[in-house]
Amino acid sequence: MLKFIKGNLENIDGVEIYPMISLLIFFIFFTALFAWVFTAKKAHIIEVSNIPLEDDNTILNETE
């Protein structure tokens, strides 16, 4: 199966740039996520972590 993919990719001009772009996007995304995790406010993290434990009625009453 790999030879079919490799054969098609060899015919595309400039295909060698795509793995580098993918790695760059991956690196930037996870670096930004890592930075956000360490700079996020503790109160926000606690509030978001308690969302699955809340009742639907409690959420509806708070928004009204």
Image (cartoon, grey):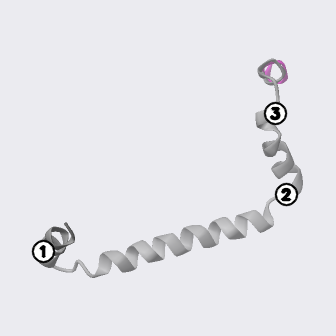
Residue at 83%, 18% in the rendered image? 61
| Residue pointed to by mark 1 | 7
Q: Which mark is residue 53?
A: 3
Left or right of residue 29, residue 49 in this image: right
The image quadrant of residue 30 is bottom right
Magenta residues (range)? 60-64
Where residue 26 appears, as percent x and y from the top left, is 50, 70
Q: Secondary structure at mark 3?
A: helix
* Front in this rendered view, residue 39 or 52: 52
User: Which label sits in the foreground, 2 or 3?
Assistant: 3
* Residue at screen point 13% across, 70% down: 8
Examine the image and state in which quarter residue 3 appears. Answer: bottom left
Q: Earlier in the sequence, mark 1 or mark 3?
A: 1
Residue type at tag 3: Leu
Q: Amino acid at mark 1?
A: Gly
> Main SS of the magenta segment?
helix
Label 3 crowd (10 A; few <14 / some 14-19 / many >=20): few
Disc marking residue 41: 2
Q: Indicate whether 37 appears above or below 59.
A: below
Secondary element type, mark 1: helix
Residue sitting nearer the eye, 43 or 49: 49
**Quarter of image, res 15:** bottom left
Q: Residue at x 47, y 71 (%)?
A: 25
